[in-house]
Amino acid sequence: MRRSRPSPMTMQADSLPNDADKPARTPHASDSQTSAGQPGGLASAEGDTQAGGNRSAHDRPVVLSPEPKPESAPGRRPPNHQEFDVAVQRVRLEEIDGVEEELQDFIREHDLLIELNLQLDRWASECLRWTVQRLNLVVWRRKGRLVHLGSGLMLTLARRIVRHEDLITATVILNKTLHTSQKLLVLGEELLFQAALARTSAMPTPQAIALCEGLEKAGRQMLRRADARQFALATGTSHATVRQHWPPGKPSA
């Protein structure tokens, strides 16, 4: 009669120590105070302190938080070397030396005819005085001097109507250096954009005459004398065209 052997599984189970045979473990005071925010029930430093500080500092688990990444300021752009640093100031006309040299060379090279043909003596003195107050010249402060950036038309206008003791408003560019393209931008904006704006927004002659008459009736005379010839000379319109639209009964000469 053969004797049956115990199966391997039974032998393994028999070989495992019984829990009752294990030495009793003294519960640690910090076992009941685990950090709710730490995985695996790691004891927090606060729990160690409340339990009497039985653990040494090197026994406590250390949780390292990732270092925050540096953030760039919102909306900040890298500096653009083509931008202007400007300030609006009041300056004396005699402080402005003239048109900037590089722009003078460009004007001569391209045979640009820069002349002020406006007959200022046809306009009322109050109009010219207000023109002085609202005048705004673009100048560049360079090495202690002011130079005009532009064609020179506005500078010529200022020299004709501004008195020596007058202060005028100027947009002063404070950049230490300017690229040629920046100077040409100021010149081109004046001669192309501003000229196009004046041309496309100019009133037809009949409407301009009616406006001049309406201002006069309301108590504001814009010309030294309100007749057709003065209007033609002041506005640069042909006398024949003005006479065609001039109100009947008003002096035409």
Image (spheres, helix red, strand yellow):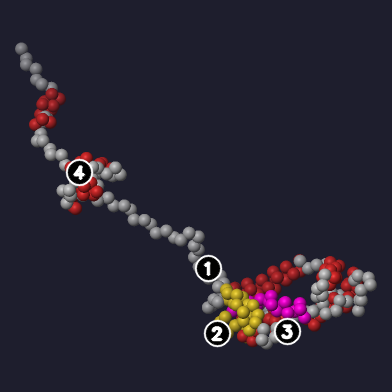
Secondary structure at numbered mark 3? helix
Say which of marks 2 and 4 sits in front: 4
* Residue 180 in which image quadrant: bottom right
Secondary structure at numbered mark 1? loop
- Identify the mark nearer the N-term, 3 or 4: 4
Residue drawn at (38%, 57%) of the image: 69
- Identify the mark nearer the N-term, 2 or 4: 4
Say which of marks 1 and 3 sits in front: 3
Residue 101 point in image, percent of width and height? 62, 83
The residue where tag 2 is placed is 144
The residue where tag 4 is placed is 30
| Magenta span | 125-140
What is the C-alpha distance between the residues marked 2 and 4? 76 Å
What is the C-alpha distance between the residues marked 3 and 4? 93 Å
For this rendering, which residue is in front, 105 or 150?
150
Say which of marks 2 and 1 sits in front: 2
The residue where tag 1 is placed is 80
- Identify the mark nearer the N-term, 2 or 1: 1
The residue where tag 3 is placed is 160
Q: Amino acid at mark 1?
A: Asn
Q: Amino acid at mark 4?
A: Ser
Categorize mark 3 by other alpha carbons within 10 Å: few (<14), some (14-19), many (20+).
few
